[in-house]
Amino acid sequence: METTFKKITVEATVNAPVEKAWAYWSEPKHIMQWCNASDDWHAPHAENDLRTGGKFTTTMAAKDGSMRFDFGGEYTHVVPNNFIAYAMADGRTVTINFTPQGDQTHISETFDAEIQNPEEMQRGGWQAILDNFKKHTESN
């Protein structure tokens, strides 16, 4: 029986052209700077092969060393500067749209919610990471 997951969408408009937003989203040196939901976490390692069939992994860790996990998946569809779709190991999927708006880029990320944690907690965590992406991209 196939599991049906609830879809959650988070969004942000980044004050950067789509080419810069795409590069900062995809380059490991940048991913390690923005891929955390709060200041007491960080991403000490990232690998990313951003192409259809490529894989990625980002280590997310508490700065105090109390917890860490690898977040990863396989890209199922990639259109440069426009669209990313990937599947996680547990079968959940994510789609990300990059929409140019002049010198800005609107990013809409839709993910399948997992069942262990409340939806609002998941929405808040994913939104915080997207907000960190916006802050990092705009400040560099």
Image (cartoon, grey):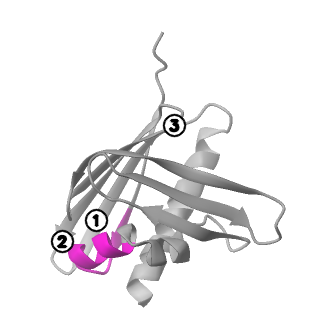
Circles 1 and 2, Cβ within 8 Å, touching? The answer is yes
- What distance separates the C-alpha of mark 1 from that of mark 2? 7 Å
Q: Residues within 10 Å of mark 3 (few under 14, many from 20)?
A: few
Q: Position of residue 61 (x, y in %)?
A: 70, 63
Quarter in which the C terminus is drawn: bottom left
The segment highlighted magenta reads 12-24
Sequence-wise first label, 3 or 1: 3
Provide the secondary structure element on which disc 2 rests: strand
Q: Amino acid at mark 3?
A: Ala
For mark 1, what is the residue? 106
Instruction: Measure the C-alpha gap from mark 3 to mark 1.
Output: 27 Å
Tell me residue 132's x, y (percent): 51, 72
Cβ–Cβ below 8 Å for labels 3 and 2?
Answer: no
Q: Nearer the viewer, mark 3 or mark 2?
A: 3
Q: Secondary structure at mark 1?
A: strand
Residue 138, x across and y down, in percent: 39, 84
Q: Is 6 above or below relative to 47?
A: above
Q: Nearer the viewer, residue 71 or 135?
A: 71
Q: Is residue 136 magenta?
A: no
Residue positioned 29% across, 70% down in the render: 22
Name the residue nearer the viewer: 135 or 24.
Answer: 24
User: Is 13 contained in the magenta span?
Assistant: yes
| Residue type indicated by callout 1 | His
Between marks 3 and 1 in the image, the one whose residue lies nearer the viewer: 3
Q: Which residue is mark 3?
A: 89
Amino acid of disc 2: Gln
Residue 97 sits in quarter: bottom left
Horizontally, is 19 left or right of 130 in the view?
A: left
